[in-house]
Image: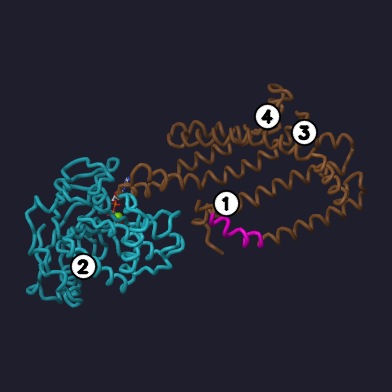
C-alpha cells in the first residue's frame, strides 16, 4: 500500500531511466524508441508477444548487451537479474548455487549458508533438496533456487525475466506474496517480464505493453489500487477489462472480441496512455 | 582435502563392488588354463607356471627394477603431454582462429599410428630413453590437446552472463565457472592418455630399448620362455588395472559426482 505514498525524490532513492532506446541485431531492428522510468518501490511489468524484444531490453538494462542508441541510466546501488532459464552451475549443489552471489561478496561459508537456509524455506525448498545438484531437481525447483539467488543479494532493483513461468498456481501465489513482502519492506524496484497478463495485474503498478516487429511500447497501463488490496476478484475483473482493450488484443494478435463488452469499464481502476 | 576425505569414505563400498570384476577375471583365468592345456605349455604357459615365474622375477628384483624404469619413461612422456597438451589446448580453445587452425593438425596427429612415430623416434633417438618418452608424448599429446580445446570452446555463455550479473570476481570466475567445466572435458582425456601411455611405452621398449618391461618381454620371447612372457604380460596388465580401479575410478566418481544420476 506504500508504493505510491512514500515515493521519495528521484535523486535520493535511485531510479532506472530508459529513454529513446533502439537496438538492432544484424540488420533487423528489435527495439524501437523505448522509454520509461522505474523508481524505488515501483513494480513495472513488461508484457508482450513472444519474440518482441523483452529479454533484449532487460539485458540492455543489466548491461549484458551494449547500448547502441538512446539512454539507460541506472542509479540503484544493487541491481540483481534473474534470467529466463535458471542458469545454475551444474557442478555446485543448490545451496552453493543459491549463495554464489554472497560468496562473490566475500561472505564466509557459515554466514552465507545460514542466510541461504532461511530464504530456502521461504521459497519452499526442503533442506534435503539443498544438498542436491541441479540435475536432480525439477524445473520449478531450479527456478526457485534461481529466484532465491537474486533475493539473497538484497537488491534495490530486481530485473526478472519470467520468474514464475515454471511454477504451479499454489507456489506462484506463495512467491507473489514473498516478492510483494520483500518489495514493500525494502522499497524494492522491480522490472519483471511476464507472459501472463493476470500476473502483471496482480503484482505491478505499471504495465508496459509491447508490440513486436520492431519491439516498441504500445501502451502503458497504470494500476491505481495498491497490490496488497488486490483480491482475486479484482484481478480477474481487471485482467478481463484489459483484455477488452483493442490495443491489447492487437498486440497479442488476438481476434477482435466477438461479443460486446461484458465488463463495465466505468468502475475501472486503471488508466492508460499510448 | 575434502575430495580426499570423501574418496576414502567411499572406498570400502567401492572395493566391495569389485567382486563382480574379480569373478570375471577368474573366468578369464579358467579360459587361459583351458587353452594352455589344449595347446601345451610351449605355446601358452599355464597360469600357475606364469605366476611362479612372476614370483621368481619379483624376488630377484628384475621385475620391480624394470617396472620402475618403464614407469619413469611412461610418466615423463605423459607429464610432458599433459602439460603441453593442456596448456596449448586451452590457449587454442580461447581463440577461434587458433582452434580452427589446430583442429586438422591434431586430427592428423591423432590418426597417425604410434608405430610410425616409433620408427621415426628410433631414427632420432636410437636406443636411449628418448625413444619411448617421445613416442608416448606424441601419441598422447593430441588426446589431451583435443580435450582441453573442447573444454575451453564449450564454456557456457549463459553461465558466463549469470556470473557477470552476480559480479563474480576474476578468481571465482576461474575456479567456480571455467575450471570445473574445462576439467570435465580434461579429466577423461587425461585418463585415456594415461592408459595409452602405458601401452605405448611397452611397445617402444620392446623394439628400441635394452631395459624396461618391454625389453624384458622381448628377451623372454627370444628365449621361447612362454612362462616368463606371460609373467611380464601379467605384470603389465596388473599395473594398468591397479591404476585404473584403485586410483582413477574413485577419483572420477568424486570429480564427476554432479554429472551422473546416482544409481
Ligand atoms: N543474439 C541475438 N542475435 C540475433 N537476434 C537475436 C538475438 N537475441 C535475440 N534476437 C532476436 O531478437 C528478437 C527479440 O528476442 P528476445 O529474446 O528479446 O524476445 P522476448 O520478447 O524475450 O521473447 P520471449 O517472450 O519468447 O522470451 C527475436 O526476434 C530474436 O530472434
Ligand atoms: Mg525472453
Q: Colour of chain A?
A: cyan
Can residue A227 be found in the magenta stretch?
no
Q: Which quadrant holds the C terminus of chain B?
A: bottom right
Residue sitting at 18 percent across and 64 percent down?
Answer: A185
Q: Residues within 10 Å of mark 2 (few under 14, many from 20)?
A: some
Can residue B11 be found in the magenta stretch?
yes
| Residue situated in front as seen by the camera: B260 or B248 | B248
User: Would you place residue B52 above or below residue A225 in this image?
Assistant: above
Can you give x and y, in whole percent of width and height, for residue B10 in the image?
A: 58, 59
User: Would you place residue A246 above or below residue B156 in this image?
Assistant: below
Cα distance in 3D space between marks 1 and 4: 32 Å
Reading the image, the residue beneath label 4 is B117
Q: SS of the residue at dot 2?
A: helix
| Residue situated in front as seen by the camera: A193 or B224 | B224
> Between tags 1 and 2, which lies in front?
1
Q: Residues within 10 Å of mark 4 (few under 14, many from 20)?
A: some
Left or right side of A269 for B152: right
Reading the image, the residue beneath label 2 is A181
Can you give x and y, in whole percent of width and height, for residue B109 in the image?
A: 60, 32
> Between tags 4 and 2, which lies in front?
2
Q: Which quadrant of the picture is home to ligand 2?
A: bottom left
Cα distance in 3D space between marks 4 and 3: 14 Å
Mark 2 belongs to chain: A
Q: Which mark is residue B81?
A: none
Q: Which chain is brown?
A: B
Reading the image, the residue beneath label 1 is B251
Mark 1 belongs to chain: B
Can you give x and y, in whole percent of width and height, for residue A92 in the image?
A: 43, 55
Amino acid at each position: 500500500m506504500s508504493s505510491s505514498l512514500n515515493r521519495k525524490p528521484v535523486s535520493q532513492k535511485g531510479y532506472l531511466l530508459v529513454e529513446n532506446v533502439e537496438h538492432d541485431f544484424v540488420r533487423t531492428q528489435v527495439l524501437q524508441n523505448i522509454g520509461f522510468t522505474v523508481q524505488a518501490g515501483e513494480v513495472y511489468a513488461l508484457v508482450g508477444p513472444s519474440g518482441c524484444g523483452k529479454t533484449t531490453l532487460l539485458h540492455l538494462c543489466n548491461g549484458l548487451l551494449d547500448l547502441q542508441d538512446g539512454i539507460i541510466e541506472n542509479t540503484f546501488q544493487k541491481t540483481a537479474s534473474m534470467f529466463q532459464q535458471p542458469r545454475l552451475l551444474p557442478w555446485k549443489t543448490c545451496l552453493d548455487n543459491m549463495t554464489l552471489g554472497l560468496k562473490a561478496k566475500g561472505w564466509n561459508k557459515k554466514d552465507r549458508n545460514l542466510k541461504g537456509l532461511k530464504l530456502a524455506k521461504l521459497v519452499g525448498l526442503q533442506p534435503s533438496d539443498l544438498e542436491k545438484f541441479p540435475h536432480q531437481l525439477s524445473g520449478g525447483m531450479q527456478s526457485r533456487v534461481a529466484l532465491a539467488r537474486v533475493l539473497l543479494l538484497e537488491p534495490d532493483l530486481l530485473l526478472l525475466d519470467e520468474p514464475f513461468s515454471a511454477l504451479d498456481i499454489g507456489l506462484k501465489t506463495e512467491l507473489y506474496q514473498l516478492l510483494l513482502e520483500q518489495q514493500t519492506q525494502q522499497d524494492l524496484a522491480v522490472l519483471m517480464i511476464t507472459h501472463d497478463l493476470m500476473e502483471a495485474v496482480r503484482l505491478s503498478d505499471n504495465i508496459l505493453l509491447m508490440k513486436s516487429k520492431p519491439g516498441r511500447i504500445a501502451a502503458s497501463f497504470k494500476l491505481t489500487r495498491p497490490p496488497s488490496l488486490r483480491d482475486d476478484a479484482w484481478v480477474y475483473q481487471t485482467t478481463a477489462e484489459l483484455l477488452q482493450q483493442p490495443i491489447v488484443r492487437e498486440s497479442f494478435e488476438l481476434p477482435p472480441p466477438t461479443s460486446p463488452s461484458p465488463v463495465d469499464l466505468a468502475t475501472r481502476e486503471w488508466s492508460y496512455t499510448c | 582435502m575434502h575430495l580426499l576425505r570423501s574418496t576414502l569414505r567411499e572406498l570400502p563400498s567401492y572395493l566391495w563392488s569389485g567382486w563382480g570384476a574379480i569373478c570375471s577375471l577368474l573366468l578369464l583365468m579358467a579360459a587361459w588354463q583351458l587353452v594352455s592345456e589344449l595347446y601345451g605349455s610351449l605355446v601358452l604357459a599355464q597360469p600357475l607356471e606364469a605366476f611362479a615365474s612372476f614370483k621368481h622375477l619379483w624376488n630377484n628384483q628384475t621385475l620391480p627394477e624394470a617396472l620402475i624404469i618403464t614407469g619413469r619413461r611412461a610418466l615423463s612422456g605423459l607429464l610432458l603431454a599433459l602439460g603441453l597438451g593442456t596448456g596449448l589446448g586451452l590457449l587454442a580453445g580461447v581463440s577461434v582462429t587458433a582452434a580452427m587452425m589446430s583442429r586438422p593438425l591434431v586430427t592428423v596427429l591423432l590418426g597417425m599410428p604410434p608405430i610410425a612415430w616409433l620408427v621415426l623416434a628410433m631414427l632420432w633417438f636410437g636406443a636411449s630413453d628418448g625413444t619411448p618418452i617421445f613416442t608416448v608424448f606424441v601419441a598422447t599429446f593430441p588426446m589431451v590437446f583435443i580435450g582441453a580445446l573442447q573444454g575451453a570452446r564449450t564454456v557456457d555463455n549463459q553461465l558466463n552472463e549469470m556470473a557477470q550479473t552476480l559480479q563474480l570476481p576474476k578468481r571465482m570466475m576461474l575456479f567456480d565457472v571455467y575450471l570445473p567445466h574445462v576439467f570435465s572435458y580434461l579429466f577423461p582425456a587425461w585418463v585415456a592418455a594415461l592408459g595409452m601411455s602405458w601401452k605405448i611405452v611397452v611397445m617402444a621398449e620392446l623394439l628400441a630399448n635394452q631395459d624396461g618391461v618391454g625389453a624384458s618381454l622381448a628377451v623372454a620371447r627370444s628365449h621361447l620362455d612362454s612362462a616368463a612372457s606371460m609373467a611380464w604380460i601379467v605384470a603389465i596388465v596388473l599395473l594398468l588395472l591397479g591404476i585404473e580401479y584403485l586410483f582413477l575410478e574413485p577419483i572420477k566418481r568424486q570429480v564427476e559426482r554432479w554429472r551422473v544420476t546416482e544409481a
